[in-house]
Image (tube, rainbow, N blue to C red):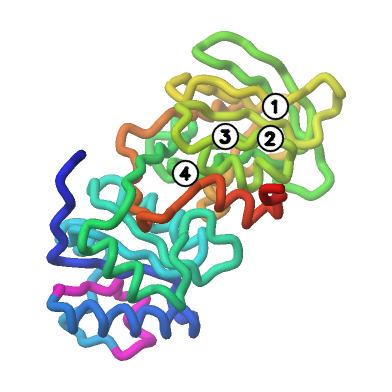
């Protein structure tokens, strides 16, 4: 068993100017200060609450200085923080102030108790991988992003089908006409992919799923492939309009007919901490309303 991590500087990130998030952050902020930790609150979050100036910092400073980042908010806040913090190889811990809470698993009424347990070594560690997408030949890097949940190709205009080709490791897989394609990680398999009929994948699986969105053929089905595969999507020249590419639903950019979208597994992964009593399948039962034991 690996020795427990030592925490001295703790970063706090969350949803800016959100009242419930602010309340939980202030509770956590004072609790950590009273316990003797050095605390840094992301500056966009600290603006609306009573945080000392010396404890406010940009996310880059938090990434360089912190031993742990606590994210207060919903899964969207964790997705945002994960993409920023993965490069710094520091663990993230989630406090749920959102709706679903698949990634932020500490409830606000237990925040001081559960965070204290984690800080004393009572936690589970987990690694999750991210995907990255860019447009081939785009030298200015304005159309590059990564994603913890999913990368989605969809029409630029409502009710217009798009046509594209999919290649895996340079092998042609299929051409498709429909509403788009979801490329999902195991983390994102309980998000948009699930709504589109994709499989639920355990977070420990090194796989991604390709889920067609309302394809114009009944034979198109989701497929799962090795996460280290190269996935290329060629947006057909026959499309009359641009499409859009979305990363985690937070970063979007246009795709022009004839362009190729290159999707790869990111080298740096996300390091998550969970309370000791965290159970992924219990989480699924709770969030998805599955039946309990007879």
The mark nearer the N terminus, 4 or 1, is 4
Left/right placement of residue 219 relative to residue 135 reads right
Give the structural element (helix, strand or loop) at label 3.
loop
Mark identifier at residue 222? 1
Residue at position x 62%, y 48% in the image: 191
The mark nearer the N terminus, 2 or 4, is 4
* Percent coordinates x, y for residue 97 in the rendering: 50, 72
Around disc 4, counting alpha carbons within 10 Å, would you say few (fewer than 14), some (14 to 19), or many (20 or more)?
Answer: many
Give the structural element (helix, strand or loop) at label 4.
strand
* Percent coordinates x, y for residue 195 in the rendering: 72, 45
The mark nearer the N terminus, 1 or 3, is 3
* Percent coordinates x, y for residue 270 in the rendering: 35, 44
In the rendered structure, which segment of residues is drawn in magenta? 37-50
Residue at position x 65%, y 46% in the image: 192
Mark identifier at residue 147? 4
Q: From mark 4 to mark 1, how far is it between C-alphas?
A: 19 Å
Around disc 2, counting alpha carbons within 10 Å, would you say few (fewer than 14), some (14 to 19), or many (20 or more)?
Answer: many
* Circles 1, 2 touching at the beta carbon (< 8 Å): yes
Around disc 1, counting alpha carbons within 10 Å, would you say few (fewer than 14), some (14 to 19), or many (20 or more)?
Answer: some
Which residue in the protein does label 2 denote?
A: 198
Q: From mark 2 to mark 3, how far is it between C-alphas?
A: 9 Å
Q: Quadrant of the N terminus?
A: top left
- Inspect the magenta stretch and tell me whether residue 283 lies in it: no
Residue at position x 53%, y 54% in the image: 102
Left/right placement of residue 259 relative to residue 221 reads left
Give the structural element (helix, strand or loop) at label 1.
loop
Residue at position x 36%, y 55% in the image: 276
- Please tell me whether mark 1 or mark 3 is closer to you in this view: 3
Mark identifier at residue 201? 3
**Is residue 15 at least partly visible in the picture?**
yes
* Percent coordinates x, y for residue 149 in the rendering: 52, 44
């Amino acid at each position: 068993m690996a020795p427990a991590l030592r925490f001295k500087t703790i970063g706090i990130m969350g949803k800016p100017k959100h009242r419930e998030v602010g309340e939980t952050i202030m509770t956590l902020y004072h609790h950590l200060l009273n316990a003797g930790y050095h605390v840094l609150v992301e500056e966009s979050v600290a603006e609306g609450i009573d945080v000392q100036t010396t404890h406010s910092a940009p996310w880059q400073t938090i990434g360089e200085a912190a031993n742990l980042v606590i994210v207060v908010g919903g899964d969207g806040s964790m997705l945002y923080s994960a993409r920023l913090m993965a490069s710094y190889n520091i663990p993230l811990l989630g406090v749920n102030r959102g709706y679903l809470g698949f990634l932020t698993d500490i409830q606000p009424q237990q925040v001081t108790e559960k965070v204290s347990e984690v800080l004393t070594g009572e936690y589970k560690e987990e690694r999750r991988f991210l995907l990255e997408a860019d447009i081939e030949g785009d030298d200015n890097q304005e159309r590059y992003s990564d994603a913890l949940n999913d990368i989605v190709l969809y029409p630029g205009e409502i009710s217009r089908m798009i046509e594209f080709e999919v290649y895996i490791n340079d092998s042609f897989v299929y051409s498709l006409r429909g509403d788009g394609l979801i490329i999902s990680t195991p983390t994102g398999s309980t998000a948009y992919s699930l709504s589109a009929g994709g499989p639920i994948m355990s977070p420990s699986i090194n796989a991604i799923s390709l889920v067609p969105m309302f394809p114009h053929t009944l034979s198109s089905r989701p497929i799962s492939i090795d996460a280290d595969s190269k996935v290329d999507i060629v947006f057909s020249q026959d499309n009359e309009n641009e499409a859009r590419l979305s990363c985690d639903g937070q970063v979007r950019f246009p795709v022009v007919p004839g362009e190729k979208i290159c999707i790869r597994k990111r080298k740096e992964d996300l390091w998550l901490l969970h309370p000791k009593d965290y159970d992924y399948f219990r989480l699924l039962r709770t969030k998805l309303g599955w039946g309990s034991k007879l």
